[in-house]
């Protein structure tokens, strides 16, 4: 049994969107954390546009992320990523999913802080391994020991991700559930009574 929300759902959404203003909700975290899938659900729940920075980079460059890595190397890719994200942040309010390394760039973090609310989807190693092993398009994991690479990335990046405005633990649960928890965390961040996020509310 879900407790009744303090506000009617629409009122809660309106209050959240009012507090958000022209800012973006920016998802950060490691590959496989679910930034795109959860980001899309949150965007649907709040009736906001959804943008994936990696897809935008591919569209601008007409190359895939793995191709960009291979041809230009990681530093050049990160420079392009920074430019694209800075441009995207001017278009809020929206939900923006960023690549795993984007938040590591100090200027990008500063821009996100100025134009958005950052949400770290924090996942454990086993969950990430299970998800990324299904995809072959992860340039940083083209290595004989992908688990070791992920462990190293977690050690390097988690202290930086922890600087995000909001941290939401993610796990092997339905996207609707995690997205609902993100919306509740956003409400708490803005000091708004939680929005109802039961299944009938979540589905468009």
Image (spheres, helix red, strand yellow):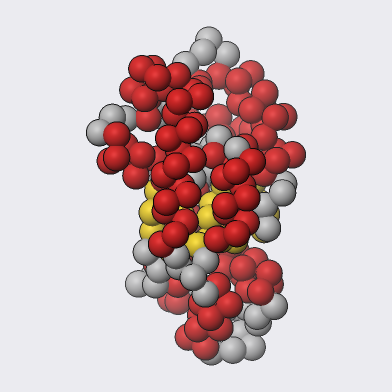
| Residue 61: percent from left, percent from top | 29, 34
Q: Residue at x 42, y 53 (%)?
A: 88
The quarter of the picture where the C terminus appears is bottom left
Where residue 5 sits, quadrant-wise, is bottom right
Q: In this orientation, which residue lies closer to the viewer: 106 or 103? A: 106
Apparent side of residue 116 relative to residue 122 in the rendered image (left or right) = left
Q: Is residue 197 above or below residue 151?
A: below
| Residue 185: percent from left, percent from top | 64, 66
Q: Residue at x 54, y 39 (%)?
A: 102
| Residue 143: percent from left, percent from top | 51, 13
| Residue 40: percent from left, percent from top | 41, 57
Where residue 161 sits, quadrant-wise, is top right
Q: Residue at x 55, y 29 (%)?
A: 129
Q: In this orientation, which residue lies closer to the viewer: 199 or 115? A: 115
Where residue 178 sits, quadrant-wise, is bottom right
Q: In this orientation, which residue lies closer to the viewer: 179 or 160? A: 160
Apparent side of residue 122 relative to residue 48 in the rendered image (left or right) = right
């Amino acid at each position: 049994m879900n407790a009744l929300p303090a506000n009617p759902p629409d009122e809660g959404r309106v209050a959240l969107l009012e507090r958000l203003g022209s800012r973006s909700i920016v998802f950060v975290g490691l590959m496989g954390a679910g930034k795109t899938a959860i980001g899309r659900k949150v965007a649907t729940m709040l009736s906001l546009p959804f943008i994936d920075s990696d897809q935008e980079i591919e569209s601008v460059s007409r190359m895939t992320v793995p191709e960009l890595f291979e041809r230009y190397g990681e530093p050049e890719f990160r420079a392009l990523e920074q430019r694209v994200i800075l441009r995207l942040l001017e278009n809020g309010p929206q939900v923006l999913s960023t690549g795993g390394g984007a938040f590591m760039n100090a200027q990008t973090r500063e821009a996100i802080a100025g134009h958005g609310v950052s949400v770290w989807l924090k996942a454990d190693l086993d969950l990430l391994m299970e998800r990324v092993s299904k995809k072959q398009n992860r340039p940083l994991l083209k290595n004989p020991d992908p688990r070791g690479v992920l462990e190293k990335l977690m050690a390097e990046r988690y202290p930086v991700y922890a600087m995000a405005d909001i941290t939401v633990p993610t796990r092997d649960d339905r996207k609707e559930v995690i997205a609902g928890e993100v919306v509740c965390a956003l409400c708490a961040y803005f000091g708004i009574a939680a929005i109802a996020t039961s299944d009938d509310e979540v589905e468009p």
